[in-house]
Image (tube, rainbow, N blue to C red):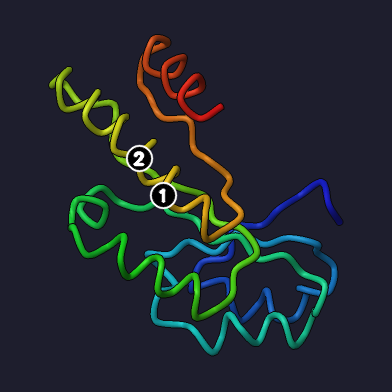
Amino acid sequence: MDYFIPIVGKDALSYFREVCTDFDYAIIPYYEAYHLVREVKELRELNPDIKLILSSIMPDEYLEKPETLKYFVKYAEEVGFDYILVWDLPTYLDDMEERWRNTRKSIEVISSLKHKFKVIPLVKGAYPEQKRYACEELN
């Protein structure tokens, strides 16, 4: 069923194991599954053809910790995700300078990870000019 890509968080993982053979892809949110290495790897045993996507979309308090990116990369390598969906920093903030700083930081992270992983880049920006900038930089 490739018109629907489920987001499989920790609460849905046990159910998804029963139906994972019906799907070509699954998105796994890092912040919910970072401690479930074995359980996520088992999805491949149940459906060897499934493509797993690790998502960096998570609450801001996780993203603001400097070690999150390091652990995200380690987890992606350990599980062997097919794709990563990156990098989600807040760009809707009141502080315009911080918005732009986070937009540039997201682009830097995406660029650095493209050499290690198949990346699905998140186009960041709360305003059209930020989104335009991000798209231009990511091309």
Q: Secondary structure at mark 2?
A: helix
Task: Find residue 7 and report its horizontal and vertical position in percent.
Answer: 59, 58
Side of 10 where 94 appears, left or right: left
Which residue: 17% across, 17% down?
A: 96
Which residue: 54% across, 56% down?
A: 84
Above or below for 91 versus 56: above
Occupied quadrant, residue 32? bottom left
Side of 26 where 64 appears, left or right: left
Above or below for 120 versus 124: below
Q: Which mark is residue 112?
A: 1
Type of the residue with mark 1? Ser
Q: Secondary structure at mark 1?
A: helix
Which residue: 86% across, 56% down?
A: 1
Occupied quadrant, residue 42? bottom right
Type of the residue with mark 2? Glu
How many marks the image carries: the answer is 2
Task: Find residue 20 and report its horizontal and vertical position in percent.
Answer: 76, 73
Occupied quadrant, residue 94? top left
Side of 114 where 62 appears, left or right: left
Of residue 74 and residue 9, the one placed in the foreground of this image is 74
Answer whether labels 2 and 1 touch (C-beta < 8 Å): yes
User: Label 2: which residue?
Assistant: 108
Task: Find residue 31 and report its horizontal and vertical position in percent.
Answer: 37, 64
